[in-house]
Amino acid sequence: MNRILIKNGHIVDPGSGKDGVLDILVEDGKIREVNRNLKVENARVIDCTGKYVFPGFIDMHTHLREPGEEYKEDISTGSNAALHGGFTTVLAMPNTKPPIDSRGLVEFVIRRSKEEKKSEVFPVGAITKGREGRELAEIGDMREGGAIAFSDDGDWVKNSSIMRRALEYSKIFHTVIISHAEDPDLSRLGVANESALSYKLGLRGKPKESEYIAIFRDIALSRLTGGRLHIAHVSTKESAQLIKMAKEEGLPVTAEVTPHHLIFTEENLEIFDPVYKVNPPLRKNEDREFLIEALKEGVIDVIATDHAPHASFEKEDEFLAAPFGMIWLDFAFSALYTFLIQKNKLDLKTVIQSLTTGPSKILGLDDRGSLEKGKRADIVIFDPEKDIEITRNFLKSKAKNTPLFGNKLKGKVIITIKEGEVFEW
Ligand code: DOR
């Protein structure tokens, strides 16, 4: 029997409500017991005095670029970067080349994840064939093949009739439809938040209304169908207010926010560095502050990274030509710890909840997300006293498109345990 005893760590597990110094016994990949002063024979003992112990993180929004764009990232490097950052489960978005819009491709991603044995990768299937927005993809078939959720991420499903069908299917196949909420007619060609600053900088803007209108329509369709709707990367105050109203009405709507929309603002664009170019764009400080409050209130359920790796030659192109996105998997939690928790903007419990039970509930992943007895032994050990430096050497990701490159962050994931397997960093 494979036994691990995690001793004297400060456990923060919103799922079970545990918050204090406790021991965890892991047996054959599962949590066997969580209690004070556990004593067992024949166990590998990991002393966690002065360290935090969390459930393995779940990132419900990543781009791993396989198949088709392996020069940016692949399932091997992406799932290793995830594990390095404490993410034991990740969802891979289907805007690959070709898009993941068939059962064969869904099964390919699952097979590749099993071969790699790193963070467990669940494919998100495309809502429409080729992600072209014209014809519904084989949602039932992909679901049977293991697709966990469905999204045309990168694009909104503009056709309301198709989105209506997708939401109806979400009920039949017990899944969730993730909306990249952006009305392209309003935002096309935009590269920044539309504001006085974007005019000053001469950058074409994406108005907040392109997100608001898309979310409004999607909520209306969730109301019509009763279908499970999840709003990806919410970036504005008004969007969060809309989601709050939908939740108060009792609609089956959930939402996520990215670390970049919690940490950065449009003012970061003043230096014209495309590393800050993301979609949706960085908004104003008042939006950022509102999103933090929405997370605290439970209006936003999840922090999801939108890890978007790109090659240096692409991201270091001029602002208009560079692609959208930044990477996060290797260091998201250290960044959240440094910029939000240490600065008392967010409490540790809210952040851990949004990375664990938040996503596990939405995705129906009942076997993980908490350190309760019987769950998968997916565990993060975090040393708040160690620093990390974001260098090429540190990153397991193939990409380095992050504004934090070269920076130091407070706190380090020192061990990730996935189903009882220990990875030391
Ligand atoms: O910043 C982004 N990057 N937003 C998206 O919606 C897509 C993503 C990507 O695939 O690079």
Image (cartoon, rainbow, N blue to C red):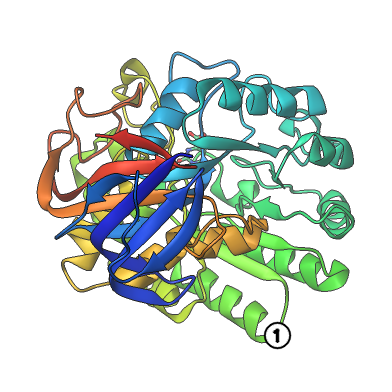
Secondary element under disc 1, as helix, strand or loop, is loop
State how many labels appear: 1
Against 300, residue 105 (above or below) is above
Query: Does ligand 1 reach within 8 Å of label 1's beta carbon?
Result: no
User: What residue is at 33 percent from the left and 34 percent from the top?
Assistant: 423
- On the question of residue 390 being in view, the answer is yes
Residue 231 lies left or right of residue 42; in this view the side is right
Residue 2 lies left or right of residue 284; in this view the side is right
Mark 1: amino acid = Glu
User: What residue is at 21 percent from the left and 55 percent from the top?
Assistant: 48
User: What residue is at 39 percent from the left and 43 percent from the top?
Assistant: 417
**What x and y, as percent, mark residue 346?**
29, 72
Is residue 74 or residue 400 the one in the foreground?
74
Q: Quadrant of residue 277?
A: top left
**What x and y, as percent, mark residue 6?**
30, 54
Against 36, residue 380 (above or below) is above
- On the question of residue 208 being in view, the answer is no
Residue 193 lies left or right of residue 405; in this view the side is right
**What x and y, as percent, mark residue 276?**
30, 42
Residue 301 lies left or right of residue 264; in this view the side is right
Question: Looking at the rendering, in which quadrant would you find the C terminus?
Answer: top left
Crowd rating for badge 1 (residues with CA inside 10 Å; few <14, some 14–19, many 20+): few
Is residue 294 or residue 286 the one in the foreground?
294
Q: Quadrant of residue 147?
A: top right
Q: Which residue is mark 1?
A: 249
Is residue 88 or residue 287 the one in the foreground?
88
**What x and y, as percent, mark residue 234?**
50, 60
Q: Residue furthest bottom?
A: 248
User: What residue is at 85 percent from the left and 52 percent from the top?
Assistant: 173
